[in-house]
Amino acid sequence: MKKSSSLLNKFILVFVSLAAVIVLLVLITISMLQFMKNQINFREVTSLFYESVLDARRSEKNYFMFYKNSDYEENIRTLARAGELINSNRFFFEHLSGQTVFTFSSLSERYVQMMSNHHHGLTRGKPGDPAAEPAIRLTGQQLLNAAGIFNRNETKYLHAGINRLILFSLSIIAVLAGLCIIIIVIASKKFFAPLKQIEAGLNVITEGGINKINIQVKDQEINSLIDTVNKMVQELEEKKWQLVHSEKIAALGAMLSGITHEINNPVSNISTSVDILKSGTGKKKSALEKKIIGQIEGEIERIRKIIGIITGFSQKKNLKMTWTALNLIIQETYVLLKKNIPEDIDLQIKINRQLYIKADKSCMQQVFINLLKNSADAIGSRKGRITIFGQLLTIKNPDDFSIFYKNPIPSPRKIPGRYIEIQITDSGPGIRENMQNKIFEPFFTTKKNHDNMGLGLYIINEIIREHQGEIFYNNSHEKSGFVILLPARDDQ
């Protein structure tokens, strides 16, 4: 196996490159932090130095006001501390201003000598030299000016260092960004691109599509993965209908607990009515007997409906799929349902005659009948409006779904493509938010009448899935209702 055809070697190359970039980044970070640490430390030294000279001037002022020995000692001590700071950090101070270091040392020696002479003269009872005090004050001011030079220069150097650090950091970021871009581009071309194609193919499979992956790559590992996936797809194709039917049978088992409750009630009523009927003596049926017989017939009809739903659900359907005009299916559905829609409800159909869907006509009519009945029930006895809107919709990438549909429930599979979009909206109150996530579950219903089993939307969802489509509840403030997406014909 050649190294160039090995995916493992490509991964190793990428990881080594990233590790080198990380090590370089760590070293540069340590260097920058050390630089900033030194700058901050010396800034603290210069600040302490300047404060020491200021303290010396303050004690000088107090000394000439009160001539206390403690002020003199404080003056000499703080000035000596400033001198120690220069001596212990002479390299840094000379870097700031070598001439000022020499000047400060000379001024400091003269200042201490002048203060000492003046103080010792006073302690011996000799009259002070009138010119000594102004000379000392002048020298003290010169010392403070020299300390200010150090302070200002250090501020300038600190700002300059920060600016250099910023420029250096930006340069490093630019270099690292360039390296990362190069690594990403190379990695994308070498193995991320084919992996993305495989992922897209697998997403189609997980969403119900049965399509083989057809990608030409040089990497033997990826080719082996593609072969394995394609074998799996072939097996899925062979077992697709078996799995669909077995899933329905399994779902039927889960439904039986709810269906049992629905069957027990009418059977109990039948048993009770028959007992009462048998206790009658006359040949002519009384009103009560007629009523009981009517009850029996009604309950038997309920049982037939329930069994019919179970039988239809458990049996595998052979769909007769043909390209049919959507407008024609809607119009025929309206003819079948017209008597069941109150006159106070305005039904508006806004569908282009050129829209075609590939569908089993009777199954699709069942979908529209159930949805229109639900809308009519939601409006009730009030005046209202039901709108059926159809259009051709092109979705180029998965993110476009969030543009067209704000809060779809459940979330669609988000497969890009061309769809026939069918919206069925009404002026009813809508479905309560806490119920929206359950509307497609079997035996869930928002209706209060006992004849409703809660299988309508569940079966509708199954039918739309068998048509390779999507149905969801679009919960937006502008238009709330059901949306159906079915694959569009290529020439539309």
Image: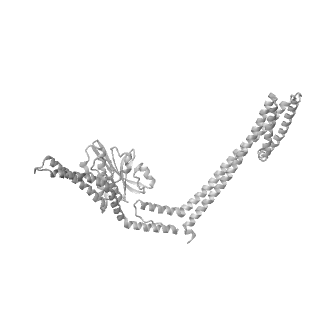
Where residue 140 sits: x, y (%)?
Answer: 81, 35
Q: Residue furthest bottom?
A: 1
Give 453 or 379, whichever is nearer the viewer. Answer: 453
In the shown orientation, is residue 457 left or right of residue 108?
A: left
The quadrant of the rendering that contains the N terminus is bottom right
Residue 221 in view here: yes
> Along the line of sight, which residue is nearer the eye, 368 or 52?
52
Total numbered badges shown on the rendered structure: 0
Compared with 228, 158 (above or below) is above
The picture quadrant where one finds residue 120 is: top right
Q: Quadrant of residue 464?
A: bottom left
State the image coordinates of residue 159 (x, y, percent, origin top left): 69, 44
Q: Residue at x 41, y 57 (%)?
A: 417
Figure coloring: one colour
Nearer-the-camera pick, 130 or 272 = 272
Relative to residue 199, is residue 220 depicted above or below? below
Left or right of residue 348: residue 54: right
Q: Residue at x 25, y 48 (%)?
A: 340
The quarter of the image holding the C terminus is bottom left
Q: Position of residue 339 (x, y in %)?
A: 23, 48
Q: Nearer the viewer, residue 297 or 227?
A: 297
In terms of image quadrants, where is residue 53? top right
* Residue at left offset 54%, top offset 64%: 190
Left or right, 354 with reference to 8: left
Q: Residue furthest left?
A: 283
Residue 357 image offset from top left, x and y in percent: 33, 57
Residue 328 visible, this orientation: no
